[in-house]
Amino acid sequence: MRVHLGGASRQSLMTARLRLDAAIKAVDARAASTLSTELFFLADVLDRNIALRRALSDSSRDATSKSALISELFGSKISAPALTISSDIAAMRWSAPKDLVLVIEALAIEAEASAANIAGELDRVEDEIFTASRAIALSPELRKALTSDAQMAKAVLVRQILTDASDSTVRLVSQLVNTWRGRSIESAFADYAHALAARRNRVIALVRVAMPMSSQQQERLSIALDKQVGQPVRINIEIDPTVIGGVSIKFADDLVDGTVSNRLAGAARAIVGSK
């Protein structure tokens, strides 16, 4: 999140992202977008209900009772993947009850970003969100209209503004203008842009090799990574002379290092440690 989260909440956000990774692995864009809608719904409910936020973030309550509460309230309203994620999140530790809302909203944005990534439109969505933020911020008339309480009118206006935009952009901006949560227009768009970037970073692989890879090698690597992540992965290749063979791949928080230099370094550490 762009906003400050306490230590426990920061750690829970990292774990929650792994749960989202698992939920959207190998699904299609429609399923990822549906999950996004459901997570936005959960964030909205929690934002309006402080008692529920406190109950789910209460560290003295056991995970089983929290999961039961989630199932009772939302079991008939959301899909199994969304229910699993929300139950897992409730079982985590939180620095403040409000952090639940912030993190679930971030996951909702990232789920829609995943839908855009599957459709090959993530870069486009990021550009459109930025363009929309500038257009709204610089127009007093739009600012006034989109910060009013008329939700139906705002929905129509968003579609008029974003006539040529992707479906993911329309969904995200429509959600944003109806859930300011006390934020300014600039702050709300910055939060959304940050969450989009966070998801993009999870599907970009930094590949370090000693020599340039052939197009066939790049294609095979891309297919392998797509299969492992369950979504299209963009490959950024870096030529590094210190790599003595093999390949080092880093994406998100994962590092797969098969270089000779890394294996030699590991052997050296083992020898030193044995003395």
Image: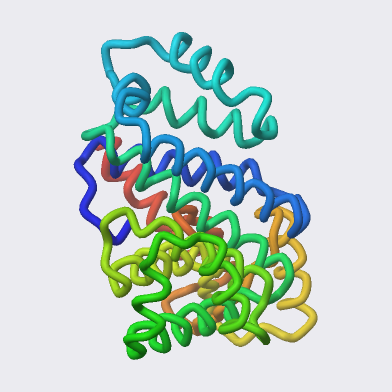
Q: Which quarter of the rendered picture does the C terminus lie within?
A: top left
Picture mark count: 0
Figure quadrant of residue 183: bottom left
Residue 102: x and y, percent?
Answer: 35, 47
Residue 129 image position (x, y, % from top left): 49, 78
- Which residue is nearer to you in this view: 238 or 23? 23
| Residue 139, placed above or below residue 94 | below
* One can see residue 251 in this view: no
Which one is in front, 88 or 42?
Answer: 42
* Apparent side of residue 103 relative to residue 186 in the rendered image (left or right): right
Colouring: rainbow
Looking at the image, residue 44 lies above or below residue 2 = above
**In which quadrant of the rendered image does the N terminus lie?**
bottom left
Q: Which residue is drawn at 67% across and 77% down?
A: 166
Q: 208 and 89: which one is in front?
A: 89
Residue 61, horizontal then vertical, whole percent: 33, 11
Give the side of residue 11 with respect to residue 105, left or right.
left
The residue under the point 58% across, 54% down is 111
Instruction: Please tell me which residue is depicted at 49% across the width and 15% down the height of the picture.
Output: 69
Q: Is residue 32 shown left or right of residue 123?
A: right
Q: Where is residue 193 in the image (x, y as percent from the top left)?
A: 42, 71
Q: Residue at x 38, y 66 (%)?
A: 148
Q: Is residue 97 visible?
A: yes
